[in-house]
Amino acid sequence: MTKIVADVIGIMDALGIQKAHVVGHDWGAAVAWGVAMFAPHRVDHLVAISVGAPGAGGPPTLEALQKSWYRILFQFEGIAEDLAQRNDWYLLREMLQGGGDDFERYKANLSEPGAVTAALNWYRANLPVERLIPAGPGPQFPPVVAPTMGVFGTADLYLTEAAMTSSASKVTGPWRYERLEGVGHFIPLEAPEQLNRLLLDFLR
């Protein structure tokens, strides 16, 4: 994650951008939190969609453990790749609740040589099993000083709302929380108009 945060800063440097609004969903939200925490002078406003601040949630609840079962599976290199592709990608279809019209595109992209492993390596590099239940308080991150908005869908199958609402404890700047009733994890795809309205209002 530290390398990817550095990549974001490198892209901003290459484009001559000193300060930007940073918006991310899922793993992108994790990167966005990292940019705001470790390069605060480069972030004007932060929007984290679905994923709360690292270190904010404390030990996982039973609900969080149940929802994050797949993170353990993804650690088993080779086995996870095999299971993901069996029976015409049955496991992935189930996890994505069918995936809608875009699933065939997902399948085609992930069928490229090495693509599934590259995707799962996000979990292997950043969410190893020992971090599911930390032995201690875990790493401590700097607070976010930028105005921050957290957006969460109440029908999220993979993450808990508490992980997002507790993120307020990691923000010293203004904090805003938006709860989207009945919306699942993939907010940018499921509720683009609602999300865009929130972004335009917050980032103006």
Image (cartoon, rainbow, N blue to C red):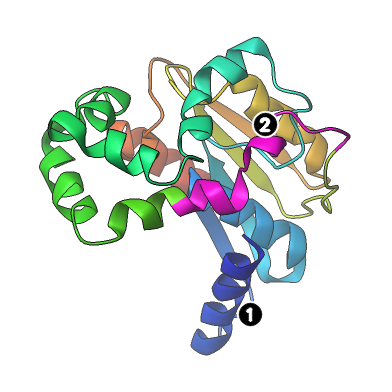
Residue drawn at 59 percent across, 12 percent down: 63
- Where does residue 34 sit, x and y in percent of width and height? 67, 57
Write down the region rendered in magenta. Answer: 121-137
Q: Is residue 150 left or right of residue 105?
A: right
Q: Amino acid at mark 2?
A: Leu
Q: At numbered mark 2, what does the secondary structure look like: helix, strand or loop?
A: loop
Q: Of callouts 2 and 1, which one flags the residue occurring earlier in the amino acid sequence?
A: 1
Name the residue at 63% across, 36% down.
Answer: 129
Nearer-the-camera pick, 173 or 123:
123
Q: How many marks?
A: 2
The N terminus appears in which quarter of the rendering? bottom right
Is 41 drawn above or below residue 90 in the view shown? below
Say if residue 46 shows up in the picture: no
Establish if 107 lies above or below 151. Answer: below
Task: Give the numbered dot on residue 5.
Answer: none
Residue at coordinates 66% horizontally, 65% vertically from top-left? Answer: 2
The location of residue 173, given as percent across then percent down, is: 79, 48
How busy is the neighbourhood of tag 2: few (under 14 within 10 Å), some, or many (20 plus)? some
Cβ atoms under marks 2 and 1 closer than 8 Å: no
Residue pushed farthest top? 62
**Residue 166 location in percent, x, y?**
74, 28
Residue 52 is situated, as x and y percent measured from the top left of the image, at 63, 36
Give me the disc on residue 132: 2
Say left or right for 121 vs 162. Answer: left
Q: Which type of secondary structure does the marked residue at label 1 adopt?
A: loop
Q: Which residue is mark 1?
A: 18
